[in-house]
Structures are given as structure tokens and as C-alpha cells.
Image (cartoon, helix red, strand yellow):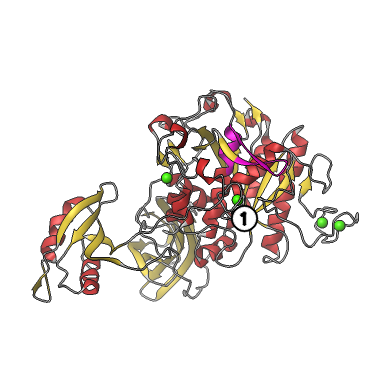
Amino acid sequence: MKKIYSILFLALFSLQSFSQDSGFVPGQLLVMLKSNDDVEKVENDLAFLNSQPTNLKSKQLLSKRLNTWLFEFSTSINHEAMLNAIKNNSFVLIAQSNHYTYERVIPNDTQFGVMWDMHNTGQSGGTPDADIDAPEAWDITTGGLTVAGDTIVVAVVDGGFSLTHSDLKFWKNYAEIPNNSIDDDNNGYVDDFNGWNAYNNDGNITSQAHGTHVSGTVGAKGNNSIGVTGVNWNVKVMPVQGSSGTEATVVIAYTYVLDARALYNSSNGTQGAFVVSTNASFGVDAGQPSAFPLWCAIYDSLGVVGILNAGATANQNWDIDAVGDIPTACPSPFMISVTNTTRFDLRNTGAAYGLTTIDLGSPGTTIMSTTTGNNYTTMTGTSMATPHVAGAVALMWAAACQQMINDYRLYPDSLAFIMKNYMLAGTDPLANLSGMCVTGGRLNLYNALLNVQSYNCSMTTVQNVEINESLNVYPNPAMMEMEISYFAPQSANAEIVIMNMLGEEIFVQPFNLLAGVNKQKVNIVSLNSGVYFLQVKSEEGVISQKKIVISK
Ligand SMILES: [Ca+2]
Ligand SMILES: [Ca+2]
Ligand SMILES: [Ca+2]
Ligand SMILES: [Ca+2]
């Protein structure tokens, strides 16, 4: 069953955008209000600043959904002072200058003009902006590394790969010497220099068009003056052959990926590979998860080490909720099931849907990407939709702040789950997908990155308090509400406090303790995704503390 998620857009005006920040319109501010009804209150509150009339007026409602307005004020008022005053107003959530924007990052790859999936300008009669907003996303990051320096890897499980394609950059296991029949890096796989061939259980990767096409969508080299542009411009694609034949082959294929990431985690990044997502553009039509318990369970295991898994649903006009599909009906929270949309933002009627099983749509019809023979071609299918999603996970990790990476190391499964929800919450709702999938929307890469930037990025300065085992928090991670249970040796007036990583108390609720087990529900709707400390405090100070994860 897929989780219900809540839409969160609070930090649209991002904390650590890498975009240019030079210049803004004098006398203008962008302001997100708590409620659109408050607009006149803000105008009245700030009609004067230091006894000077400001002429502050709301000029335009920019986003009704986001309560965001364009305000104007007299340019004789100091811009910084006005900005600070409006930021401190109690009806205002976010305020900033109205910056001049610059042309988005349009890469120089020669085929980019036909890549409607990345940037739909109406080419071939399509609907402008029926796309994943890739140039806007690339203004934030073009991928490759995390802020902590991890080399981001996407594992593509497919039929074969053209390793020599000049527009692709594949992952290599440099700790392994190829073709010497020795497992040089002692990871359990002999000669796995280029990846793994699960059909033959060896390191010989053979070439095939399908896997090469999928790889190009995930990560064809961007802005290198040739061919196509991947969702990521620099990411490493790990080739794993094993997408057809028997289920036994699939188990070997995923286990190679699982081993690589588990080794990365356990070696503190000195061995293995920082695989953040897998791509499965294959499956079993009408397969029932109950008949494939092993295959479905692998996604949970991959999730535990921090990997999200994008799965292509059936290329049939079927309701997967009714007929089933492997892997896209697998109930794992670490599976992201994908259907195929067109240049008109319509579901391709040759692609499956499912209100509870299929998470989102992504462009998959007439997609230009890499193929064998150092060439390029268009292909159509859910197979082409899914690598946009697997690639998006990788780009999102490239946009994550240091604190989020730190938390990912400590809680890989929780943070993977947060990432999935950021992606789903960022989809563009499409009328044509409404009621047809969990989100009713199509991937939007830019929104996904903005959501990543809403993470609670304040760095840890909180001292660890001795963990009192009598404090329990459920569920953890939690989305909207947590239940606190605490065993108190005697009655006391206490409170539940939630602190951010800077040690700032951002939530306080009385917790009147009686001797014995005490239970209380805590509403966390107002808190952003992130890792926090939950404390039980009495007059004597903190008596118990637990780290909690909030995942929206
Ligand atoms: Ca667009
Ligand atoms: Ca090896
Ligand atoms: Ca070797
Ligand atoms: Ca290119």
C-alpha cells in the first residue's frame, strides 16, 4: 500500500540555491503570507517604518495556493530595512527580494531541442511545459556529487549496455582488476570492473539498445556539445545485466547492487558504491506480489541501506490495482512505480495505471536518448519513463544539504523515504492522471529539488543526553502525528519538547506525568521533514530524549 502524503511547499524560496543572486527590483518584495486574508493587515502594520510612510501595497497575488504576493513600497525606504520589517511581521511566513531571473540552463547537446521530456517548448506540436522542468532544476544542480563529496551512482538493471558510447559515463569498480579471474577487492564478485552480468554471473557486460537508452535518460553527459542530455549531467550509471529470463537472475542482479551500497555504508564510503536508486524497466505483466515474495522483499532490503527503486509498470491499458504487476504492485515503500506520459501531458493509453499501486507519471513517449553504435534514437514505453524517476533521485541527492547527508548516513531508510515523498509531493497534477495514480501527477524535477531544499538543514549542535529506554515514540519516522509513551517513576509536571538540530525549541506541549506508563499524542503537522530531538523535560531539566525523524 502506498502512503498518503501531504503537499509541502513552504520553502519554495530556497535556503541554499546555487543560482545567481545578483540584483533585485528596488521597491519590490515577494511575500508568503500565513493566509491570503492577512494581506491588508500587513499593509496596515507596515504603513510606516521609522515614522516614514512606506506606501506598502500588495501589487499582485502570485500564487493563491502558496499565499504568495508581490508587494511594492516606496523606493525612498531602505530596502534591507523594509525586508527585515516584513520578515518580522507576524502574518508573514517568508519574505525576500524580487530577484531578476536569468535564462535557464539550456545545455548545448545537439539533440536537446527535440527532448520535450526535459524542456517542452511545443516542439512537434506538443503542449509547452508538458515536461519535467529540467532546465529550472539544472539551475540548482546538474548532479554528480553530494555536498559531502559522495560520487552518486544509479544502478540500471537491464538487458545490456553499450559501454563505449561517447555520451555515457558508466561506473567502474576501480578496486577490481578486470579479466584476471581474481576477486581483487574481495567483494564476492570476480572481475566486476564494469558492473555485473547476472545471467552469466560474471563481469562481462554486453551491449544492447534498451539498457543503453535507459542509461542515457538517467545520465547522458550534459553540455558536452554532443547528443542528448541526461537528467543528471555527470552521474555514474552502474550496469547490471539481469532484466529477463528467470526471477533467479533478478535476485542476483539486485543483490549485486545491495552488496555495493551496504559495503559503502559499512566502510564509511571507502569501498562499494553510493547507489541511491535503481531502475527496473522490466517486469512480469499481471504478476501478483503474493506469488513473488522474494522479489518484492528485495526492495525493502534495498530501502534499508538507502536505495529507492523506480519500476516501469506494464505497457498495457490496465488497472494494476485490479490485475497486478511485478514489480510495480510490490507493496514496498521503497518502490516508486511509474507510468508513461506524452508530450501532451496525457497518460499514454498503452501504459498501465493504478490509484494505489502506481505512484506517478513521467515522460515516456518518443523519448530521445542514447543507443548502440554510438548513436541516438527515440523509443516509447514505461521503460523510458522510469529512468527519469531513477535519475531524479540521484539529482535530488546532489541538491541535499550537509545535514541531510549526515542524517542519510545515520538513517538511510528514513531519508530515502523522505526523498520519495519529496518527489511525489512535487509532481505536477494532471487532470488526465487524476484518480489514476497515487499522486495524480507527473514528475517535476524542479519541484522535487525545491522540496529537498525545504529539509531542516540546521547543523547538529545538541549535546546527546543519556537515552532513557522508558521513552518510546511511535511511529518513527512519522508524518502527521506521533504517540509518546513514557514510564515515570513518580508523578511530575513535565513537557514534551521538540528541538531542531541547533537546539532551538520549536515545539512545546505539557505532559503531566503520573507514576507508571504515560501516553500522549503529539501533532507534528507544522514541522518540516528532518531529524529532530524529542525530549521529556521536568523542572529538573531533560529527563529523557530520543531522536525522531519527520517525513512528509
Ligand atoms: Ca518546463
Ligand atoms: Ca570484486
Ligand atoms: Ca579481478
Ligand atoms: Ca550529451
Residue 505 among those drawn in magenta: no
Nearer the observer, 135 or 452: 135
User: How many marks are shown on the rendered structure?
Assistant: 1
- Quadrant in the rendering for residue 374: top right
Task: Give the residue number, with chain letter if any, for mark 1.
Answer: 235
Q: Residue at horizontal 48%, vertical 72%?
A: 460
- Quadrant in the rendering for residue 436: top left
Secondary element under disc 1, as helix, strand or loop, is: loop
Q: Is residue 87 visible?
A: yes
Q: Quadrant of ligand 3?
A: bottom right
Position of residue 273 in the picture relative to residue 321 (left or right): right
- Quadrant in the rendering for residue 147: bottom right
Q: Residue at horizontal 47%, vertical 31%?
A: 355
Q: Residue at horizontal 22%, vertical 50%?
A: 61
Specify start and end residues of the magenta stretch as a single range.
Answer: 369-387
Which amino acid type corresponds to the residue marked 1 in the rendered image?
Answer: Val
Q: Position of residue 138 (x, y in %)?
A: 49, 55
Nearer the observer, 538 or 428: 428
Q: Is residue 294 visible?
A: no
